Image (cartoon, rainbow, N blue to C red):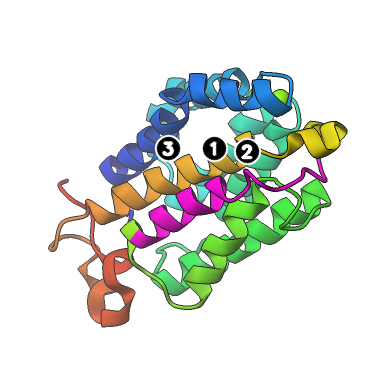
Amino acid sequence: MIRSEAARRRLIRALADSVILHAEELTRLDQAIGDADHGLNMSRGFRAVLDDLDRIAALALPQALGAVGTTLVMKVGGASGPLFGTLFLQLGKSLPEPADAAGLVAAAAAALDAVRARGKSDPGAKTMLDVLAPVVAALRAGERDPARLSALADAAAEATRPMRALRGRASFLGERSIGHVDPGARSSALLIGAACAVLSAAAPTGEAADLQAGASDGAFGAPDAGP
Ligand SMILES: [Mg+2]
């Protein structure tokens, strides 16, 4: 899956770029129903991750994800820092090394639960959980196709548009939160899309070919491309 330092570097860079390159869009979304700082805060966090990329990519995947989480907690601020930090910290805690598809699904489920507990919220409140929950549900139901998971995350973020916010700053707007995509849901979809793109770009031969032993593992069992 993601075994080599080069693969970890690709993954972390893709995650960071997905947020940094969409900072303006995230800011616009947060302008509509929040305080317009989501794009800036998330970019600051992921720029700090990129600044530390050499050290982070040298770590095993669980520790690397944990280091991303720690950096986000320290640098993002607001409500998003602890929430996105928790997502990565729990992924790091729960992911086995080496990871297989089953381990990844279990870690994703644990990360969802941790974010839910940290935010004291549930899906349906127009938050990042409205993207994370359906993606984890699809993983648990056996979906392993990165393109379909990525499309599901995008659709789930879009589906927050008609929702009324029940948590976070947007909830202060009541009915006026309706009609706008939730910024945290959008950043969650961006991160999931980035991770799926790295996984689907994996080549058919390589160091993690053992993960392909189970055919149902599909692209999640695909090995890393290149050295
Ligand atoms: Mg904000």
Dot 1 or dot 3: first in sequence order is 3
Residue at x 62% of width, y 61% of height: 133
Where is residue 75? Give x, y as percent. Answer: 64, 23
As shown in the figure, which amino acid type bears the numbered disc 1?
Ser
> Quick one: SS at disc 3?
helix
Quadrant of residue 2 within the rendered picture: bottom left
Query: Is 26 situated left or right of 193 in this image?
Result: right
Decide which of 169, 116 is in the foreground and name it.
Answer: 169
Percent x, y for residue 63? 51, 47
Q: Position of residue 206 (x, y in %)?
A: 16, 60
Residue 71 in picture, x, y percent from top left: 59, 30
User: Cβ–Cβ below 8 Å for labels 2 and 1?
Assistant: yes
Residue ID for mark 2: 184
Estimate the spatial distance between the alpha carbons at disc 2 and disc 1, rounded to whole Å. 5 Å
* Amino acid under disc 3: Leu
Residue 15, label in figure:
3
Q: Which residue is mark 1?
A: 187
